[in-house]
Image: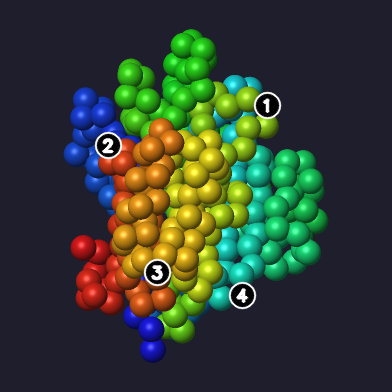
Amino acid sequence: MAKIALAIHGGAGTILKSQMTTALEAEYRGGLETALKIGWEILERGGSSLDAVEATVCSLEDFPLFNAGRGSVFTHEGKQEMDACIMDGHNLKAGAVAFVKNIRNPVSLARLVMERTEHVLLAGDGANQFAEQIGVATEPDEYFFTEHRWLQLQEAMADGRVQLDHAEVAKSHSRIRVGLGTVACDTNGHLAAATSTGGMTNKKFGRVGDTPLVGLGNYADETCAVSCTGHGEYFMLGVTAYDVAARMKYKGLSLEDAARETIAHLTKINGEGGLIAVDPNGNVTLPFNSDGMYRGSITAKSGGQPP
Ligand code: GLY
């Protein structure tokens, strides 16, 4: 039986010390721990890595402090346009959605794209039509409204920039916080990855990042499962998620060495962020080049406890 493992991230970057309170820190920590527990319980009772990553990401999407689902950042027009991807490394299948609106759990819609269509990626109105047709849960705009995201938009618009929650922002909580994701290895050694995001504050023109693009922000095969977080454009240019798998396959590197090289390459091309990755032996790695990365993992080696 393979060693089960689960890792999650809640976005790269740090919350400014001046904005952080003990209560806020406890909220972030609580959100990550709750999500980890949900995924771990599925793996422990022999569930699939695919079920574990979907359920873990759903929990994070429902949690308003993370930039995905309910806590998604606002576009220039004051809307939330969300991207998500899920990939099953065992059978090399993936589903993804881009700039969908009012979907409660974009990751579940992505899974339905994988399981109920002959496509990999559905975008915009078409993806929303598909959601309506199959009865996926939607929520009104008010459900997705959070005060701190709205402030971030006002600040970004006042400064005329598209932002990744930068440090110089006065009232918003954080520096780069772009999305969330999970990777898992189940008892069969099957791997899966899921990633979800609201993208960048003040984004325009249907901007889509790396998250819903297979191999860029999210990837899983028999070698590893990878979920990325950070400035999406650079993860697109670095083909970052697949880069970890390629280094393992073609260079024979371990998961940790491959992921380290991938982040070094990201740094070289001026990208900022991080990734989480797992291999079929239950090894986990969580490297980043940003100030920090909200992250957590549970493995058989950690005795089934968050480290
Ligand atoms: N990495 C997520 C994004 O840039 O949208």
Residue 107 visible within the image: no
Q: Is residue 130 above or below residue 66?
A: below
Verify CB contact (< 8 Å) between mark 1 and mark 3.
no
- Is the residue indicated by label 3 positioned so its CB lies within 8 Å of ligand 1? no
Horizontal side, residue 186 vs residue 217: left or right: left
Q: Amino acid at mark 3?
A: Gly
Whether the residue carrying mark 4 lies under 8 Å from ligand 1 is answered with no
User: Which sits in the foreground, 72 or 92?
Assistant: 92
User: According to the image, label 4 marks what residue?
Assistant: 91
Q: Are marks 4 and 2 in contact (CB under 8 Å)?
A: no
Q: Is residue 236 left or right of residue 64?
A: right
Q: As rendered, which of 83 and 260 lies closer to the eye?
A: 260
Mark 4 or mark 3, earlier in chain: 4
Residue identifier under label 2: 291
Q: Which is more N-terminal, label 3 or label 1?
A: 1
Badge 2 vs badge 1, beta-carbon distance below 8 Å: no
Spatial CA distance of label 1 from label 3 is: 41 Å
